[in-house]
Amino acid sequence: MPRIAIKICGLSTPDAVGAAVRAGASHVGFVSFPKSPRHVEPDQMRALAAVVPAHVERVGVVVDADDELLAGLTATGALTALQLHGKESPQRAAAIRDRFGLPVWKAIAVKTRADIDAANAYAGAVDRLLFDAKTPDGAALPGGMGLRFDWTLLRGLALPAPWGLSGGLSADNVGEAIRITDAPLIDISSGVESAPGIKSVDKIMAFCKAVSSC
């Protein structure tokens, strides 16, 4: 079985970035969304991304960002992809990819099978889909809340783009998640934290070890 890609998201310190790289993460994620406890300013994001080894992808996570913010995040070339975690339409996603010349991921909030089916609208507009749990109505954050959805909804589906699984994952349940969904990429944020926004080196190591054993 090919090695499963691992994205450790919401990194905000050099120590956490270093732990993710040492643990074998294939992708690291940095959040630009002031309401999030994982938010980093553009200068900080670029500085953190710049020290990541070239073999690890560096993903900037944004929520309904305008072009001015995206230009600031991508100006130095430190990022290798942009992840859209808001209500961006397929047209907006495609426009961002065209303007900034980076692969674009689109997070899809899932509660029912209809939510997954709606991802078909992004065929040809994005480079990767990321299926995450739908947060409660009125929640301040679109993700990173440790919620999971019914993973069996993804079983055996033909999806319109490469994809990954996120939401409510931990070292204890990621094996089950992979067995059910056969996800080629696993994305985690709050599941490797000791407190909101505070990454745990031990949890990062344990999670990556659990994925690599699948």
Image (cartoon, helix red, strand yellow):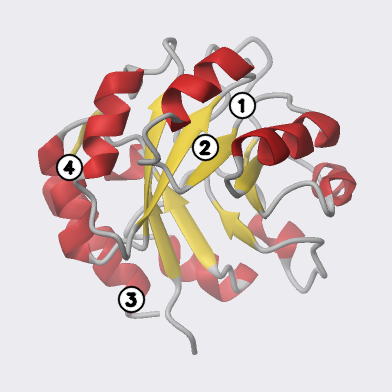
Does residue 129 appear left or right of residue 193 in this picture?
right
Gap in angstroms between the C-alphas marked 3 and 2: 23 Å
Q: Residues within 10 Å of mark 3 (few under 14, many from 20)?
A: some
Residue 15 to residue 40: above or below: below
The residue where tag 4 is placed is 16
The residue where tag 1 is placed is 135
Label 2's element? loop
Gap in angstroms between the C-alphas marked 2 and 4: 22 Å
The label number, if any, that marks residue 212 in the structure image = 3
**Residue 137 is drawn in which quadrant?**
top right
Residue at 15% from the left image edge and 52% from the top image edge: 19
The label number, if any, that marks residue 61 in the structure image = none
Specify the amino acid type for callout 2: Leu
The residue where tag 2 is placed is 147
Q: Could you tell which of marks 2 and 4 lies nearer the N-terminus?
A: 4
Does residue 40 appear left or right of residue 153 in this picture?
left
Specify the amino acid type for callout 3: Ser
Q: Could you tell which of marks 3 and 1 lies nearer the N-terminus?
A: 1
Label 4's element? helix
User: From the viewer's perspective, is the residue at label 3 or at label 2 nearer?
Assistant: 3
**Residue 165 is drawn in which quadrant?**
bottom right
